[in-house]
Amino acid sequence: MLLGGLAATEVVHAQSEAASAYPSRHITMILPYSAGGSGDKFGRILGRAMEKRLGQPVVIEFKPGGGTNIGTDFVVHAKPDGYTLLLAGTPLTINPFLYKKLPFSIDDLAPISIVSISPYLLVVGSSVPAKTLPEFIAYAKKNPDKVSYASAGIGSGAHMGGALLNLVAGLNMSHVPYKSSSQGLTDIIGGSVQMTLTPLVVGTPMVESGRLRALAVTSLKRSKSLPNTPTIAEQGYPRYEVLGWYGIMAPKATPPDILRKLNEVIVASLQEPDVVKALEVDGIELKPGSPEEFAAFIKRTAADSAAFVKATGATAE
């Protein structure tokens, strides 16, 4: 027992020494999305703020594909030394219920801190005659074979939101998954796809320029940045709410001291005035917290996702 206790003490001491020397080189933040979306903006701004506190570069690397599963799997199987992080998001907690088999589970990742929670903006292109959500629903019912909705891939917020609207409004819109939200938005502007749900930070400039038309936001309350855009809830579907989120995670076996150090850095970075000003716009709410709070959030969100998949029949197959 004494030898075992000494061995355990030596391990803890070694981990503490490793954490005190960490980081000694650049950190890679994996974004399992394509460049140009809201994840790109979050990753770059947060990464720059983290660099100031860590004294080492935070390199952004994009690994899109497979509904974010490719990038997520890369981090799961990376060396658990704190030098490979994941900017996780909505798909993480829904993909286990959409895909019959994944090469990883949520439990293979260690939560560090949630970053943000934000609503989506339901937008249509100029080829759609509807000016309001009720008009769009009526149009979709009248043209069941002509209306489709775009998403940034299986398991994305837009996928969930479109499937949920199909369910609550009795629609039969086809789902068209893309590798990136920007590709879907391009086709909506071009008229080959009719609708999508996009982060406000991405969609609002396109609405303001006249390229897209906003019909609703997906939070229960109106966005302060778009006070004249009604919620889906207030337009006849009172329980409709779809929110996106981002959070930082690491491989499961990453030493606790390193996870704790990263948490402290991320929380402090997300409280910097310049970071708040840059990110807390268009309905986005920064929500830095403890790893335990993030773990509890993931558990709740996964339960909601399971219920959503069961109710809508959504699948990745």
Image (spheres, rainbow, N blue to C red):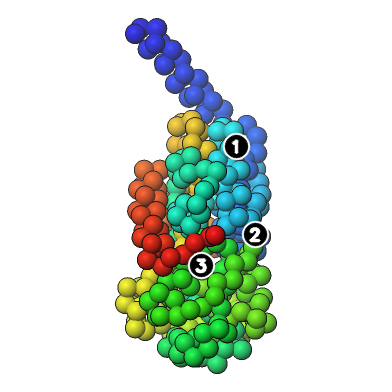
* Residue visible at 51% across and 73% down in the picture: 197
Residue 61 spot, x, y in % from top left: 66, 49
- Do we see residue 240 in this rendering? yes
Quarter in which the N terminus is drawn? top left
Q: Which of pointers 3 and 1 lies earlier in the amino acid sequence?
A: 1
Does residue 45 lie above or below 119 as drawn? above
Quarter in which the C terminus is drawn? bottom right
* Number of marks: 3
Q: Secondary structure at mark 3?
A: helix
Amino acid found under the numbered disc labelled 2? Ser
* Residue visible at 61% across and 88% down in the picture: 126
Is residue 59 found left or right of 305 in the rendered image?
right
Q: Residues within 10 Å of mark 3 (few under 14, many from 20)?
A: many
Q: Secondary structure at mark 2?
A: loop
Does residue 294 lie above or below 125 as drawn? above
Amino acid found under the numbered disc labelled 1? Ala
Q: Residues within 10 Å of mark 2 (few under 14, many from 20)?
A: many
Is disc 2 in contact with disc 1, using a CB cutoff of under 8 Å? Answer: no
* Residue visible at 55% across and 43% down in the picture: 103
Residue 78, label in figure: 1
Is disc 3 in contact with disc 2, using a CB cutoff of under 8 Å? Answer: no
| Residue marked by disc 2 | 34
